[in-house]
Amino acid sequence: MGKKFRTRVQGESLQRKIDADYEQYFCIWGFFLAFFVLTVYIWLFYFGVWNITLGLAITFSVFTFGVLVYGIRKSLKLIRHMRNCYKGMEGERLVGEMLNKLSCDSIRVFHDVCGDCFNVDHLIISTRGIFTIETKHYDRKKGYKFLYQDGKLLFNGRVCKTLLNQMDGEANFISEKLESLCGRNYPVQKVAIIVGAYIENPARDFSRYWILNESGFPKFFSNAKESLSIDEVRSIANQVTEWLKVSVD
């Protein structure tokens, strides 16, 4: 029986990062526990019948204490990273479910498209064009705010170049990949879907970037002009599927 294949699902890269964080977390505390037990035994030997010097007991105690301090600091960092990954994964899954509802013969949706050291959260290939989508997820209660004006993006009043750079890099990556797969350069619309934050665009400038809430994207997408035929969509989607498919164990 031959291997089965699938494309990646929303949040898959973040789930792998979370799994890696858990592995590091348990390795750190397993390492500490081993040295803690060894140190206890050495002290017991020092006060018992075995010939253990005070210097050796103190050395192991200091080393074990150092491992404890390192473990606490590293664990707090891992916990913060895991929380951020969980938050991001929730956003990707929410947006992914919304995009999957749009999926049909003329709209193909792909999730978690991996590049070198980064990933495109979602990719749409449709008769309305090709879209790369970066997802961000924030706590709505904290009142985060994005302002896009005069080609600049502000996050809570501060210039935020990171998101625009991400959108540029992801679109360029997909454009170059599609050209290598299909032999043609396709324009790619750069999209960011922000969950849980306010977005202002006073000039309604959507010429280069679509920075939208999850509720706004379907309307913008449905109003986009058709630029590809269904046959082109099928052809591109088939090429992308072959590129992205991974084996199912």
Image (cartoon, rainbow, N blue to C red):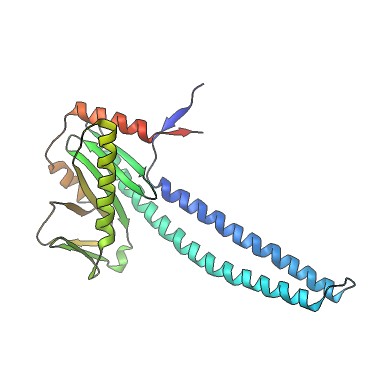
Residue beneath the point at 62% across and 69% down: 67
Who is closer to the viewer here, 57 or 213? 57
Q: Quadrant of residue 35?
A: bottom right
Is residue 130 depicted above or below 34 in this figure?
Answer: above
Residue beneath the point at 39% across and 33% down: 245
Is residue 230 depicted above or below 214 in this figure?
Answer: above
Can you see residue 105? no
Residue beneath the point at 20% across and 37% down: 185
Residue beneath the point at 16% across and 29% down: 229
Can you see residue 235? yes
Outermost residue, left side:
203
Outermost residue, top side:
1
Q: Position of residue 194 (x, y in %)?
A: 27, 56
How many discs appear?
Answer: 0
Q: Is residue 131 left or right of residue 40?
A: left
Is residue 148 depicted above or below 118 in this figure?
Answer: below
Q: Position of residue 4 (x, y in %)?
A: 46, 28
Outermost residue, right side:
49
Who is closer to the viewer here, 110 or 62? 62
Q: Position of residue 157 (x, y in %)?
A: 22, 71
Q: Is residue 55 left or right of residue 117?
A: right
Q: Position of residue 49 (x, y in %)?
A: 90, 72
Q: Is residue 82 left or right of residue 47?
A: left
